[in-house]
Every structure is written in C-alpha cells, then in structure tokens.
Amino acid sequence: MRTIKRFLFILAVALSCGAFTSNAQIEVKIRPEVPRFERGAAPSPRHVWIGEEWEPRGGAYVFVGGHWAEPPHPGWAWIPGHWKHTPHGEMWMAGHWRRR
C-alpha cells in the first residue's frame, strides 16, 4: 500500500507540473527495465486497466505506472503501448484509446 501511495503522490506532482504534455519520441539502444508495480482493485466495472507506460523526458524514458481509467466513449478499447525496433534502437509507441 505504501508503494501505491508513493506512486500516486509522484504522479500527482508530475501532472501538476505539466510533465506529461510532451509528444516527443526518442530512440534508445537498450530498453529501460520495468520497476515493480502493484495493481489495486478496479474502482468500478466500467474501468479498464491502463498498463505501465514510458514517457520521453529530457532525452530518456521515464516509467509511468499503470492506472484504472474509464473509456472516453462507450465501446472504446485501450490499445497498450509497445516497444518498436528501429534502425537506431528502440522506440516506445504510446498506448491509446480506439473504437472497437
């Protein structure tokens, strides 16, 4: 529980600072390692688990833990982010909502 509270505090600070506004993408030679994260219970049956993501910040990827979210519209599904191999290294392709 302490880990979740700590993560939520860090996430709240980052959001209040506008840390997630960049759409820039970077390439890395080696994928960063994923920290451990505990998933809590869904707030409601409508909520969908949004898996862990990587955010590009300052020329590096920063891990952003998963969270529960409601789809923006009925019938939409979450498409998880994934790593894509490029000629120069690895690039994170961010997750997004899509109509089913």
Image (spheres, rainbow, N blue to C red):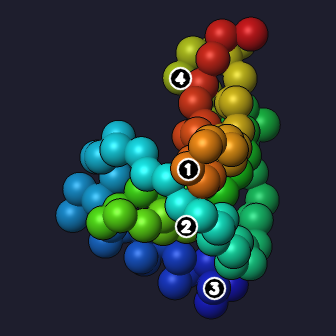
Around disc 4, counting alpha carbons within 10 Å, would you say few (fewer than 14), some (14 to 19), or many (20 or more)? few
The residues tagged by marks 2 and 1 sit, at their Cα atoms, a distance apart of 21 Å
Q: Which residue is drawn at 35% across and 64% down?
A: 59
Callout 1 amino acid = His
Query: Which residue is nearer to you in this view: 76 or 19?
Result: 19
Callout 4 amino acid = Pro
Closer to the chain start, of discs 3 and 1, is 3
Closer to the chain start, of discs 3 and 4, is 3
Q: Which residue lies furthest to the bottom in this view?
A: 2
Q: Is mark 1 on a helix, strand or loop?
A: loop
The residue wearing badge 2 is 63
Res 41 → quadrant: bottom right
- For the N terminus, the image quarter is bottom right
Q: Residue at x 56, y 40 (%)?
A: 94
The residue wearing badge 3 is 3
The residue wearing badge 4 is 72
Around disc 2, counting alpha carbons within 10 Å, would you say few (fewer than 14), some (14 to 19), or many (20 or more)? some
Q: Which residue is drawn at 64% across and 67% down?
A: 30
Q: Which residue is drawn at 68% across and 30% down?
A: 78
Res 15 → quadrant: bottom left
The residues tagged by marks 4 and 1 sit, at their Cα atoms, a distance apart of 35 Å
The residue wearing badge 1 is 88
Between marks 2 and 4 in the image, the one whose residue lies nearer the viewer: 2
